[in-house]
Amino acid sequence: MPTFAIAETNKFLKVDMVKGHPVKLLLIHPANKTRTGFLNDHSTRFMPLGLGIVAALTPPHWEVELLDESFEDFTLRPADLVAFTSFTSNAPRAYEIAARYREAGIHTVMGGIHASMFTEEALKYMDTVVTGEAEGAWPEVIADFEAGRIKRLYEGGINDVDKIPHVRREIYKYPYAYDLVQTSRGCPWGCEFCSVTHMCGKIYRERDVEDVLDELEETTRPMVFFVDDNLVNYKKGSDERAIRLFKGMVERGMKKHWLSQAALNFADNEEVLYWARKSGCTIILMGIEAENPEALKDVKKNLNLKRGTGSYETVIKKMHRHGIGILATLIFGMDSDRKEDFMARGEFINKSTLDAYQCTILTPLPGTTLFDRLKEQNRIVLNNYPDDWKHYHFIKATHVTPNMSQDEIESTMHEVWLNLYNKETMRRKMFRTLWNTKSFMTAYWAYASNHNYGRICLEGVPESNVAGSGWKNFKHRLYLKFTDKVIWLIYQLVWTRMIRKISANR
């Protein structure tokens, strides 16, 4: 039973605590049920960091529970207040679950990127919506709820990073592979397809390094994902800050393997690379997006344009010298793209020394300049909202381009995925990474990343088809048998030790 006696006063809920019982907050991270996506493997089911911050901002007399549908299907359970976060693609699921609680008379709240970017819609399905950053609104939400005067809308805005609390990690009861830590917020670049600048502002706001290190010491998992949009920023002193962070991890004896997101400038300073690797950096997710300047112009990827596409290989080689791999993001479906450009981008990936690659279809997310432009041009074809949001997972064409129809985008993309995520390509990439980085961990991590992206992009395609017709050739069959044994050996020597560490901390 709920631990509050609830009565309605003037359209607001008046709440009186039942003596001797704690107040219960249920945090829900919904999952998109239309595709498996990142749920295909434990290593890609990331903890909802925002809900950990909400939990930390909640007073200690509240009982806080997390329900993460990445691991556990929703069932109706007792709560006094239910709070959701969601990306665009799982927003319909959040609305579906919220309806169950609203029918039961339990107050629902939604925050996060989708609610912040499409607030009017969220207000139709939730009792309360919080926009912007939780630190600027959540304490008021709780106080108002306890006083029986909770409002429909709270604006958290953009806050001083000193207000960011250490994440309340005991709520993460599921077997996540990574601990998530954020060291900064904000991005000045304003790429057309990205909503980060709109959500978190144009100015880099960096947390105190010692505070970040203190929070890192609270993590228990052997792998860490720094979720900054750009771990080494472009502002003056960012290199020195990064070095202090990485050196601090070494000096405090943290034995972590970590990855993060960074731009091309990550490789500018050899000392940054040295200490990044020494502190456990294994692979960096980097926004390459395209090898074609025209495509970069289409989406206003000005940083890469300024540096030039010819700088990519230089960056990769510098990182490889320090044993660090690159997980590159590549986008397909820009305005100037034709079928031959899709194939050329795939060939660029194949021939490059990139270690892993996330290849997605350009998707107009709410809150982006891209969404506003394509909506104005009447080019978004999946626009039956909120139901169609479930397709905004980057694997389906949601719009048309001047040169390609929706069907042509999807069929050509499928062909590219088959060429890049087949066994031969992925294994040759892995051995090349091993040669370039001299690191079994980096090579296997890159291979595992490609394997997971392949399963996501080619969901429902039989593995025999993904392998490709070339495997009928005796030479290819021999290669497959040989590499099966090598991969098994690397898995046993490197990855199983990591899994044992993860299991020990669950």
Image (tube, rainbow, N blue to C red):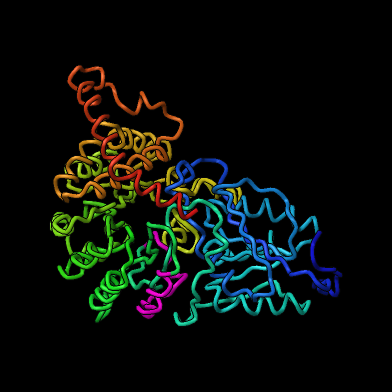
Does residue 453 appear left or right of residue 87 in this picture? Answer: left
Where residue 13 appears, x then y in whole percent?
A: 80, 71
Residue 305 location, quadrant: bottom left
Name the residue located 30 percent from the left edge and 47 percent from the top edge: 445
Q: Identify whether 323 is placed above or below 420.
A: below
Where residue 34 appears, x then y in whole percent?
A: 55, 41
Q: Quadrant of the N terminus?
A: bottom right
Name the residue located 47 percent from the left edge and 57 percent from the top edge: 365
Pick the front one: 280 or 138: 280
Is residue 25 visible to the viewer in this orientation of the structure? Answer: yes
Name the residue located 21 percent from the left edge and 51 percent from the top edge: 291
Pick the front one: 136 or 47: 47
Pick the front one: 174 or 453: 174
Where residue 242 appears, x then y in whole percent?
A: 27, 73
Q: Identify whether 198 is placed above or below 505.
A: below
Does residue 496 appear left or right of residue 427 in this picture? Answer: right
Whether 99 is among the magenta residues is no
Is residue 258 visible to the viewer in this orientation of the structure? Answer: no
Where residue 410 appears, x then y in whole percent?
A: 40, 37
Pick the front one: 19 or 229: 19
Does residue 123 appear left or right of residue 173 in this picture? Answer: right
Bounds of the magenta span?
A: 192-217
Whether 206 is among the magenta residues is yes
Q: Identify whether 295 is placed above or below 264.
A: above
